Amino acid sequence: MKTYLFVLFFLVLLISGCGYNSVLSKADKATFNKDYNSAIELYSKILENSKDEIVLASAELAIIDCYVKTNNFKNAYKKIIEIQDNNYEPPFDEWLIYNKIITEYNLNLYVETFNTSSSFLRTFKKSKVYDKVKEYAQLSMNSLGKSIDINEIIESPEDKSSEKAGIS
């Protein structure tokens, strides 16, 4: 009887896990087909119901991507703030911070864009998007009416970069 219950329990776990993997697969397919609104709905279902950490992480990052691609920067930023302390490993940490910069800039959060960009530029010096992030930092300062030498900011300690830029 115990063996029967164990097998039954295992099958229930397996089936429920496969159910979310199937939803994740459908959401990924919708994203691939650029049907971002459908993908957002499917990823949202996963975020509400799944207990699997890997499936949840995939859905969290994917829904941010869909929000950014649909110019829904407010929801993308909310989700980024919600999950930013999850300690994602490379390359996901770099991707998350880069998308945070994009959303901050598009929400006219120029001080935040500059601070996040400065941190990114210090941390990910070999990033493929390094020059783009440098441009976001410069544009955010220009939007605030400031002119700065971004290289000087990048080389300064993190706690001094806002001070050197003349922002707080």
Image (spheres, rainbow, N blue to C red):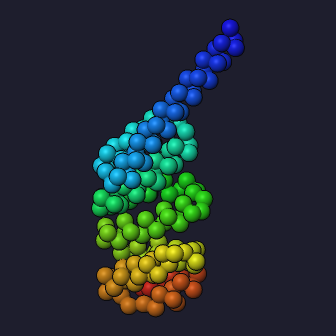
Q: Is residue 10 left or right of residue 28?
A: right
Q: On the picture, is 26 further left or further right than 126?
A: left
Instruction: Please indicate, yes or no, whether residue 135 appears anywhere in the rendered image.
Output: yes
Q: Residue at x 43, y 65 (%)?
A: 99
Q: Quadrant of the C terminus?
A: bottom left
Query: Would you place residue 65 above or below residue 127 in this image?
Result: above
The quadrant of the picture occupied by the N terminus is top right
Name the spot of residue 154 as percent of width and height, x first: 53, 83
Q: Let me know if residue 47 appears in the view.
A: no
Q: Is residue 64 left or right of residue 161?
A: left
Residue at x-position 52% and y-position 90%: 152
Please give the name of the residue rendered at 56% of the width and 45% of the height, measured from the top-left corner. Answer: 54
User: Is 148 drawn above or below residue 167 in the view shown?
Assistant: below
Give above or below for 67 relative to 161.
Answer: above
Residue 23: x %, y % from top left: 43, 38
Question: Camera-side residue: 134 or 143?
Answer: 134
In the rendered image of this protein, does residue 94 appear above or below residue 78? Answer: below
Could you tell me which residue is drawn at 35 percent across and 61 percent down? Answer: 68
Give whichever of 30, 51 is nearer the camera. 30
Question: Residue 153, image x and y in percent?
Answer: 51, 85
Which residue is farthest top?
1
